[in-house]
Structure formats: C-alpha cells, structure tokens
Amino acid sequence: NAGVTQTPKFQVLKTGQSMTLQCAQDMNHNSMYWYRQDPGMGLRLIYYSASEGTTDKGEVPNGYNVSRLNKREFSLRLESAAPSQTSVYFCASSDYHLRDRGSEQPQHFGDGTRLSIL
Amino acid sequence: DQQVKQNSPSLSVQEGRISILNCDYTNSMFDYFLWYKKYPAEGPTFLISISSIKDKNEDGRFTVFLNKSAKHLSLHIVPSQPGDSAVYFCAADAGNNRKLIWGLGTSLAVNP
C-alpha cells in the first residue's frame, strides 16, 4: 500500500539545469498537488490538478511547470533551476470532488524530494 | 499576510500532560480546518479536522476546538506521549477546490 510515491528523494542540481520531479498515487484520487516547504515558510502550493486533464496555479508557480500525465501521475518540472528553488517538495493527493460537509477528504502526502540547487 | 497563524513556533510538554497547540485565522470564508502532523524526513500526515458548523471534534487522544467568533482553533493532546513529538500544522480550507492555506507549524517536544 504505497500511497503517494515521489522520486527522486534527493537531488543536487547546478543553476540552469532542468529536472522533473515525479509523483504517483495509487489511491485513485482525482486531485493532486505540488507544494514546497522552506524554513519558516510553511507549505506553499505551487500547482494543483483538480482532476485528470486540468491544472491550475497555486501561490508560487513561477519557474515551474506541471503535467497531469494520467489519473495516477503528476509531475513537476523546473526548466532552468535557480538557487531560490532549493527546497523540499511535497506531492499530495486527495479524493476531493464535490464539497461534502462532514465528509472531508484530507490530502495524503508523499515523503518529499529534497532539492538543492548550487 | 499570513491568513493562518500558529504563533508558537515550539512547545515542550511532559509525558502524560496535556499539549495545547493553537491556531488563529483571519479569513471568515474558511469553513473547514485540518491538523497535520509531520515527522522529520517524512510528509505531513492528516490528524484530525473540524467543520465550521461544529465547535468540537474528538478522535481518541486528540480533540480540536473551534471558536468561530474569535477565529481561533486549538488541538488538545491528552495524554501526551513521546511519540507525539513532531511538527503540527494547522490548515484551512475556503472551499475553493481544496487549496489549503497552511500555518507555519508548531514543533512539539514531549519529554519522558
């Protein structure tokens, strides 16, 4: 029962390099999310996908692109990495579809990708 | 501006005692609140939630209280155990497609 799987777990990049962070969930959730966590900043939403085929910007989308490849997979791409993108990146999924009071579907998180950009 | 505030960055409690973690919010449109727990090198895990139509929700040792007039919620852990030592995040949902707004977290240390 894997839940949300993120790869890689660690990565070091040089400024200007590109990379794609992978995320897959096996819970048949329709919504998926990418967050970054920085010291003293909490969790900030980068992009999300409410359902397969849709993606939307979150709080901090600049410098990132996403692809909802299918229902299971949601990838995050850094086209030209910058030191300011050094962070821990978390992918999450949930079964959110309709507002249903009293039956909240929380987000389930992966264990994160620790990314350092030199 | 921080819409969800956890004003205590850290809290230390003796094993067996009550831990009280606090969270304040500014947006009256928030109608669902969640608490997550995070251990180092792991992702956050969902702990407990509360709808704005309730003022209390209980799950085992964990109880969340909501005071809408004060825009304040708190998480009570009774009794506290060393395994509860983690960072606790408060998050709020305004219903707009589940874009949660997160507090900065409170690091709880439960001492044996």
Image (cartoon, rainbow, N blue to C red):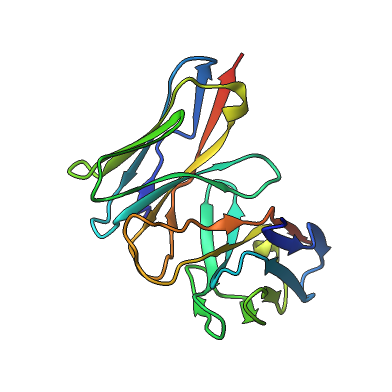
In which quadrant is the N terminus of chain B drawn? bottom left
The answer to whether residue B90 is above or below residue B58 is below
In front: A12, or A28? A28
Question: At x 62% / y 76%, what residue is drawn?
Answer: A64
Q: In the rendered image, which quarter is residue A32 located in?
A: bottom right
In front: B9, or B47? B47
Q: Position of residue B63 (x, y in %)?
A: 38, 33
Question: At x 38% / y 54%, what residue is drawn?
Answer: B92
The answer to whether residue B47 is above or below residue A90 is above
Q: Position of residue A8 (x, y in %)?
A: 80, 62
In which quadrant is the C terminus of chain B drawn? top right
In front: A83, or A38? A38
Q: Position of residue A97 (x, y in %)?
A: 43, 72
Horizontally, residue B102 falls left or right of residue B23, namely: right
Q: Position of residue B109 (x, y in %)?
A: 57, 25
Horizontally, residue A7 falls left or right of residue A32, namely: right
Name of the residue lying farthest toward the bottom = A53
Question: At x 60% / y 69%, what residue is drawn?
Answer: A28
